[in-house]
Amino acid sequence: MKIRNCIYNFVLFNFIMFTSIQGFSKDKGGFSEKMQDAPAWSSFVVDENKDKSEDTVKILGEAAENLPVEEARKCIISCLQERTDDKVGAWSKVYVFNRLYFNVPEWEEKKSLRFFGGWIGIPEKDGKINVMFPLEKNANGRIFLSKNFGGYSGPDYDGLGEFDYFLKKYGLRKNSTIFSRR
């Protein structure tokens, strides 16, 4: 009886997840489509491709404006489950999006953080980690993509776990006017 209930719950859960993701991925012109269209941070050199760098932040930032958390969460699930030859590219979009969508600080004590992937090149100094990496704020408070992708090493990136952690720890970023060109 317990095994049958477990199997039933597993099948029901997967059916619900599959149908909700399928419906969400048909969101023409919506966030899911924009996430797909945004250049992956891992696919270009920031200094040599200012347009791609600015497009990534602008597309994801503007798409995130007034985006309900549950919709964003569904899109993250869809993006992370997408079958692609460049899974790190898909992960890098989620990684950048999480730092745009949530009100993450620039620097935080390393000992107070949880880590969800093996991103290479995240700056550390005086026991602190740059949580916003690869993003930065200019003198006007505008957020832009400033650092190149340094690589990825280790187990799969848990972008959904990071999404939930950032939601609980930092909350949403309030002002969408910060997403623009340098």
Image (tube, rainbow, N blue to C red):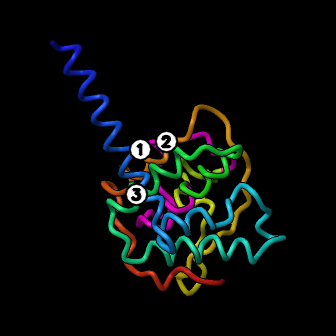
Dots 3 and 2: beta carbons under 8 Å? no
Q: Nearer the viewer, mark 1 or mark 3?
A: 3
Name, please, the residue furthest toward the left: 1
Q: Is residue 111 magenta?
A: yes
- Foreground tag (3 vs 2): 3
Residue at 71% x, 55% y is 42
Front-most of residues 129 and 32: 32
Query: Which of 51/120 is in front?
Result: 51
The residues bearing labels 3 and 2 have C-alpha atoms spaced at a distance of 23 Å
Which amino acid type is shown beneath numbered disc 1?
Answer: Gly
Q: Is residue 118 above or below residue 141?
A: above
167 vs 76, left or right, is: left
Q: Which residues are magenta?
A: 95-121
**Image quadrant assignment for residue 144:** bottom right
Q: Disc 1 or 3, which lies upstream in sequence?
A: 3
Q: Position of residue 85 (x, y in %)?
A: 71, 43
Q: Element type at marker 3?
A: helix
Nearer the observer, 50 or 6: 6
Residue that carries the numbered disc 2 in the rendered image: 158
Q: Is mark 1 in CB contact (under 8 Å) with mark 2?
A: yes
Mark 3 lies on residue: 23
Image point 32% across, 59% down: which residue?
A: 70
